[in-house]
Image (cartoon, rainbow, N blue to C red):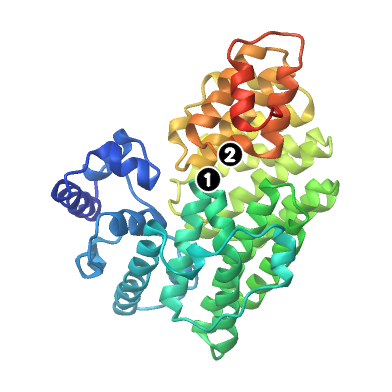
């Protein structure tokens, strides 16, 4: 294990013990199981950027104790735009970022500050056209706020994310507009793109047309940055919006074209390329193009097997487990869920890094069993979704799946209570 991971683990363990908290208590707040916290403290599990600052904020670890040498390699605005920056510049930038994000993380945890106090928008699309007034902020602070927002998405804290996003987007745009041309302007544009990517992801969860608006703005900002990774991230969410509106063929064309432009031999760009191939496979399956779907899935699998996983990608990581989850989704979409049963049997959902991804995996497994007519297995998977992410199971798609199961021919013990709890059964 790396010395940096050991140092971080020891620092977190010491701070937790000083506050007389259990690993379970820390994990509950920070979105990890007690066993995962144990592995983090032992230096056996790497934290992504947003998770690190959330742990630090909750445990009251001063930013100056998070020395640059102990910060794990993570994908953030500085690294994707890194180019030929010297080691000294990288160290200075990491220290600046930690100083900014520690304050942002503390705000997110304790609920202070104007962004946390804002009420959730009634209509995400309307809020995108009526962004609040905002002043430019230091770029490190902006990067920190986006890291925290990403962490909320990955932890399925959708209500909190919805409250924060309008102000975050407004701040990102104000910062970009006030930044002169050059590397800083590119990084500010990436920040804008990533704020809109989160908005598009959230809108897609809500089945909102705002996904189109946010994804289009994300791609525009990403292209202006000139950073391939940001362009890939934004292209993926735009393709999802296209697919959901019935334009699967166009979505596949966009994804494959963008994937061609990413260097498969570089860790970050290669990993993002793999996620584009996975989304392309699912989009092709939505268009009932089995040949293209399986070809893209196979290519993504080969890429995932060829290199170690890159931790800290924005919302989806390119791992073999993630490929297996997409394979289940592709088979469901193609109308051949029986072909996914063996894959699901060998799936270890615990290998997925975030509650959002684990909930998505269990959702695909639930859909598989539902299509095969197995009510009890479907319900078991739905309960796993709720265990991983309580807000996820209340999404429209999950409520519809629960309601369909409730009013189906099979009587499943406990299902009615579950439906009432999750909003699938009207009071």
Position of 152 relative to 94 (above/below): above
Query: Mark 1 sits on what residue?
Result: 156
Label 2: which secondary element: helix
**Disc ID at residue 88:** none
Q: Quadrant of residue 65?
A: bottom left
Q: Residue 367 or 239: which is nearer the viewer? A: 367
Q: Quadrant of residue 56?
A: bottom left
Position of residue 263 measured from the top left corner of the image (x, y, whole percent):
58, 60
Are there few (<14), some (14-19), or many (20+) residues within 10 Å of tag 1? many
Query: Residue at 74% of width from left, 71% of height from top?
Result: 129
Query: Mark 2 sits on what residue?
Result: 392
Q: Spatial distance from mark 1 to mark 2, Cα to Cα?
A: 6 Å
One can see residue 233 in this view:
no
Label 1: which secondary element: loop
Sooner in the amino-acid sequence: mark 1 or mark 2? 1
Q: Residue 110 or 339: which is nearer the viewer? A: 110
Q: Quadrant of residue 215?
A: bottom right
Query: Residue at 57% of width from left, 33% of height from top?
Result: 361
Q: Residue 366 or 69: which is nearer the viewer? A: 366
Position of residue 169 measured from the top left corner of the image (x, y, whole percent):
59, 70
């Amino acid at each position: 294990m790396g010395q940096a991971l050991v140092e971080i683990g020891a620092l977190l363990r010491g701070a937790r013990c000083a506050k007389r908290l259990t690993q379970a208590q820390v994990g509950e707040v920070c979105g990890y199981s007690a066993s995962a916290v144990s592995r983090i403290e032992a230096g056996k599990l790497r934290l992504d950027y947003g998770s690190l600052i959330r742990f630090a904020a909750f445990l009251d670890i001063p930013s100056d104790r998070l020395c640059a040498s102990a910060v794990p390699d993570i994908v953030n605005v500085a690294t994707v735009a890194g180019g030929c920056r010297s080691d000294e510049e990288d160290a200075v930038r990491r220290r600046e970022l930690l100083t900014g994000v520690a304050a942002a993380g503390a705000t997110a945890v304790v609920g202070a500050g104007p962004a946390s106090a804002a009420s959730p928008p009634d209509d995400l699309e309307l809020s995108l056209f009526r962004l609040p007034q905002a002043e430019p902020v230091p770029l490190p602070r902006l990067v920190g706020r986006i890291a925290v927002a990403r962490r909320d998405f990955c932890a399925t804290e959708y209500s909190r994310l919805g409250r924060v996003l309008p102000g975050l987007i407004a701040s990102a745009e104000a910062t970009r507009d006030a930044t002169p041309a050059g590397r800083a302007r590119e990084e500010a544009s990436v920040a804008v793109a990533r704020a809109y990517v989160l908005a598009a992801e959230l809108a897609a969860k809500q089945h909102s047309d705002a996904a189109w608006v946010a994804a289009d703005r994300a791609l525009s900002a990403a292209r202006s940055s000139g950073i391939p990774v940001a362009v890939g991230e934004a292209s993926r969410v735009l393709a999802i919006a296209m697919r959901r509106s019935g334009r699967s063929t166009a979505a596949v064309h966009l994804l494959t074209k963008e994937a061609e432009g990413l260097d498969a031999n570089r860790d970050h760009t290669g990993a993002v390329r793999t996620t584009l191939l996975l989304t392309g496979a699912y989009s092709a399956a939505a268009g009932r193009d089995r040949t293209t779907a399986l070809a893209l899935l196979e290519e993504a699998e080969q890429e995932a097997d060829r290199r170690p996983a890159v931790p800290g990608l924005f919302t989806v990581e390119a791992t073999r487990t993630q490929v297996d989850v997409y394979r289940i989704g592709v088979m469901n979409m193609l109308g051949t869920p029986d072909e996914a049963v063996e894959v699901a049997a060998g799936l270890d959902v615990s290998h997925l890094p975030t509650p959002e991804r684990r909930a998505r995996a269990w959702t695909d497994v639930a859909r598989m069993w539902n299509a095969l007519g197995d009510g009890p297995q479907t319900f078991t998977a739905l309960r796993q979704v709720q265990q991983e992410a309580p807000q996820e199971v209340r999404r429209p798609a999950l409520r519809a799946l629960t309601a369909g199961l409730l009013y189906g021919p099979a009587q499943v013990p406990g299902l009615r209570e579950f439906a009432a709890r999750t909003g699938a059964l009207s009071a």
